[in-house]
Image (cartoon, rainbow, N blue to C red):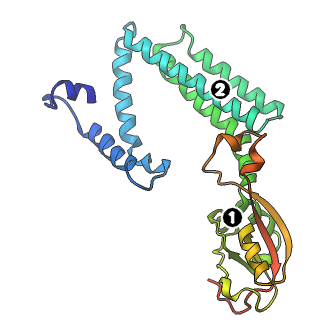
Amino acid sequence: RLWNLVRGRFARPVDAEVLTLGGFLLPFIALSTSQYKLPHYIFVVFPFAALLAARVIGQLLARVEAKPFRVFFSIQLFIALGVWLSAVLLCTLAFPLKSVWVWALAAAGFVCTLWFAARRQPAATRLIVPSAVAVVGANFLLNLHFYPTLLTYQAGSQAARYVASRPVILQNLYFFRYGSHAFDFYTRQITPNLPGNEAGIGSTAWVLTTAEGKNELTQRRVPYAIEREFVHYHVTKLSLPFLNPATRAGRLGRVYLLKTRPVASLPRP
């Protein structure tokens, strides 16, 4: 659609519809060039992208024997196989999966991908279904193994799991030089911050902090004991050194749950 507009020097044919193209392209450019962006920001333009894709698919299916159909089929099959390969690598090299039944289900999904891509299948099936099966199957594999394993390196969620079964800690807990939305989500409460200049006064409480925060409490001569230590990594910022088991340890931080004596009168939300 965009190429046709460029070739026509942006002159819109009488029967052409450009609202869908503009509705996708302009917000996508704006969101992509913004200073602060996350992948889910572009979800709002996905319906327009689906309409554009449906139009192209309709044109391809109208001329199955033409070269464009073969080109698009090859591209989508290549991507489908790439999706499977990526999922398998993550579940073998990064976090080895040992469950036989999960591997069996993944293998069945891969076989289905090849089956629906076979020549004896209808053209629409060959063009659409292999990619759909690959996406569903790969996400199934990742959600059963990769993501649960990855979250064990998110200190906030692991700390929340630890304190959830210990109401005494949860009712007397503060952040110090640390914060975690995941922790607040899983504990279903907003944990207050402990002001650094008031630490060490009052009744027994627990503090969730980083190595830097722990060192600061030590410098302030605040008495504490390490209740629990959690490894931490920003799981939304995956990198090859982290995914590589041989170099992962060097990328991990530490978060500590300390039993100390912070302010008894510190207001809680």
Mark 1 residue crowding within 10 angstroms, few (<14) / some (14–19) / many (20+): some
- At x 43% / y 47%, what residue is drawn? 42
Query: What label sits on residue 140 in the rendered view?
Result: none
CB under 8 Å between callouts 1 and 2?
Answer: no
Q: Nearer the viewer, mark 1 or mark 2?
A: 2
Instruction: Tell me if residue 69 comes above or below residue 203 in the rendering.
Output: above
In the image, is 7 to the left or to the right of 155?
Answer: left
Instruction: Tell me if residue 203 comes above or below residue 78 in the rendering.
Output: below
**Could you tell me residue 18's position as x and y percent?**
23, 36
Q: Would residue 33 be visible to someone looking at this image?
A: yes
Instruction: Tell me if residue 169 comes above or below residue 34 in the rendering.
Output: below
* 109 or 181: nearer the viewer: 181
Tell me the SS state at disc 1: helix
Tell me the SS state at disc 2: helix
- At x 61% / y 83%, what residue is drawn? 269
* 165 or 241: nearer the viewer: 241
The amino acid type found where label 1 is placed reads Tyr
**Could you tell me residue 239's position as x and y percent?**
64, 43
Counting residues from the N terminus, which is met first, the one under dot 1 or under dot 2? 2
- At x 79% / y 71%, what residue is drawn? 257
Res. 180 image quadrant: bottom right
* 2 or 257: nearer the viewer: 257
**Could you tell me residue 260's position as x and y percent?**
81, 82
In the image, is 74 to the left or to the right of 147?
Answer: left
Res. 77 image quadrant: top right
**Could you tell me residue 14's position as x and y percent?**
12, 29
Query: What label sits on residue 85 in the rendered view?
Result: 2
Q: Would residue 171 be visible to someone looking at this image?
A: no
Instruction: Tell me if residue 151 comes above or below residue 2 in the rendering.
Output: below
In the image, is 138 to the left or to the right of 7?
Answer: right
Residue annotated with mark 1? 186
Q: Quadrant location of the N terminus?
A: top left
